[in-house]
């Protein structure tokens, strides 16, 4: 069984930074891509960033471009989301996801495995 475990969320002030981590454990699987999504109360889950595992290509939502950076550590089977210049509108539960085949980076249904989420709250 594949497990994705997020960590690093918390309560910060506007302008602060946080780094989220997503560690993969359990059954070995071939990652095609990893992604980060977020969901605020009453809203749909939205795409934040994605990374093509083998080639390292990255993709970002317009709302986070220039502020967030997705990266990976192959040896640790971990993907990170560095979040800088946080804004109150970034407040949400953040989810890590893994995809084992090509697909649309921005669609949650393209992903095969999901973590439980970590809460990020940004106060003004």
Image (tube, rainbow, N blue to C red):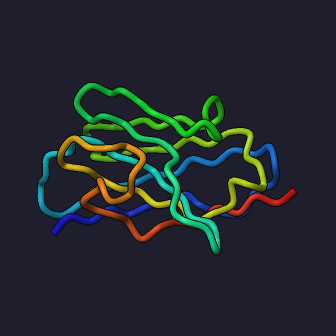
Residue 31's image quarter? Answer: top left
Whether residue 35 is situated above or below residue 26 in the rendered picture: above
Whether residue 51 is situated above or below residue 109 in the rendered picture: above
Q: Which residue lies furthest to the bottom in this view?
A: 42
Whether residue 12 is situated above or below residue 48 in the rendered picture: below
In this view of the protein, which residue sits in the foreground, 121 or 99?
99
Residue found at x 56% / y 64%? 39
Quadrant in the picture for the N terminus = bottom left
71 with respect to 48 (left or right): left
In this view of the protein, which residue sits in the foreground, 106 or 98?
106
Residue found at x 51% / y 36%? 60
Locate residue 74, reporting x and y percent.
27, 37
Residue found at x 25% / y 50%? 99
Locate residue 59, reporting x and y percent.
45, 33
Whether residue 59 is situated above or below residue 83 in the rendered picture: above
Residue 58's image quarter? Answer: top left
42 with respect to 28 (left or right): right
Locate residue 97, reporting x and y percent.
35, 56
Quadrant in the picture for the C terminus = bottom right
């Amino acid at each position: 069984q594949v497990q994705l475990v997020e960590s690093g969320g918390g309560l910060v002030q506007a302008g602060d930074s946080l780094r989220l981590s997503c560690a993969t454990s359990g059954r070995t699987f071939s990652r095609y891509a990893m992604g980060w999504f977020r969901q605020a109360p009453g809203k749909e889950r939205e795409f934040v960033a994605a990374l093509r595992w083998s080639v390292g290509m990255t993709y970002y939502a317009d709302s986070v471009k220039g502020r967030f950076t997705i990266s990976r550590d192959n040896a640790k089977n971990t993907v990170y989301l560095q979040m800088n210049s946080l804004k109150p509108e970034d407040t949400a539960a953040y989810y890590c996801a893994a995809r084992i085949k090509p697909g649309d980076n921005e669609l949650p249904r393209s992903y095969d495995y999901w973590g439980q989420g970590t809460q990020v709250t940004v106060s003004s």
